[in-house]
């Protein structure tokens, strides 16, 4: 099968199956590093425990985007109040670019 035909077939798949194909292809390019993945999982579990115990508090996406704007100049804060998820925000930014 030619690459062009393979791509055409992959694009026609349902979104869940396309995501699986993409994930598989990316994993083939960037092999998982189990030591790093294990450390990331440990940090995530620890942070979740801290959040549940009240040791730390959650920060809203709007606050994060505002801080990114101030510190890094990313231009995200204007989208945070208009969107419900990162995917929605990505779409809003794409729409504005077009």
Image: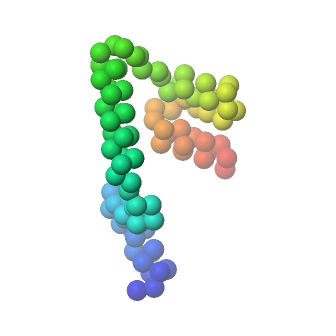
> How many labels sit on residues?
0
Front residue (pair 98, 40) = 40
Q: Residue at x 58, y 32 (%)?
A: 79
Q: Position of residue 57 (x, y in %)?
A: 41, 16
Q: Residue at x 45, y 85 (%)?
A: 2
Q: Residue at x 42, y 78 (%)?
A: 6
Corner quadrant of residue 66:
top right
Q: Position of residue 22 (x, y in %)?
A: 41, 62
Q: Residue at x 65, y 43 (%)?
A: 96
Q: Quadrant of the N terminus?
A: bottom left
Q: Does the image show residue 9? A: yes
**Outermost bottom residue:** 1
Q: Does the image show residue 22? A: no
Up the image or down, 58 lies above or below 10; here it is above
Q: Position of residue 56 (x, y in %)?
A: 40, 16
In this figure, which colouring scheme has been used for the structure?
A: rainbow
Relative side of 14 to 62, left or right: left
Relative side of 98 to 18, left or right: right
Corner quadrant of residue 47:
top left
Up the image or down, 92 lies above or below 57; here it is below
Up the image or down, 59 lies above or below 22; here it is above
Front residue (pair 72, 92) = 72
Q: Position of residue 67 (x, y in %)?
A: 61, 24
């Amino acid at each position: 099968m030619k690459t062009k035909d393979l791509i055409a077939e992959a694009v026609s798949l349902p979104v869940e199956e396309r995501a699986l194909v993409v994930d598989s292809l990316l994993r083939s390019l960037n092999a998982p590093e189990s030591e790093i993945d294990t450390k990331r999982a440990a940090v995530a579990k620890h942070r979740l425990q801290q959040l549940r115990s009240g040791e730390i508090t959650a920060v809203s996406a709007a606050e994060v985007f505002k801080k990114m704007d101030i510190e890094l100049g990313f231009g995200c804060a204007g989208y945070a109040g208009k969107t419900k998820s990162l995917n929605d925000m990505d779409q809003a930014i794409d729409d504005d670019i077009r």
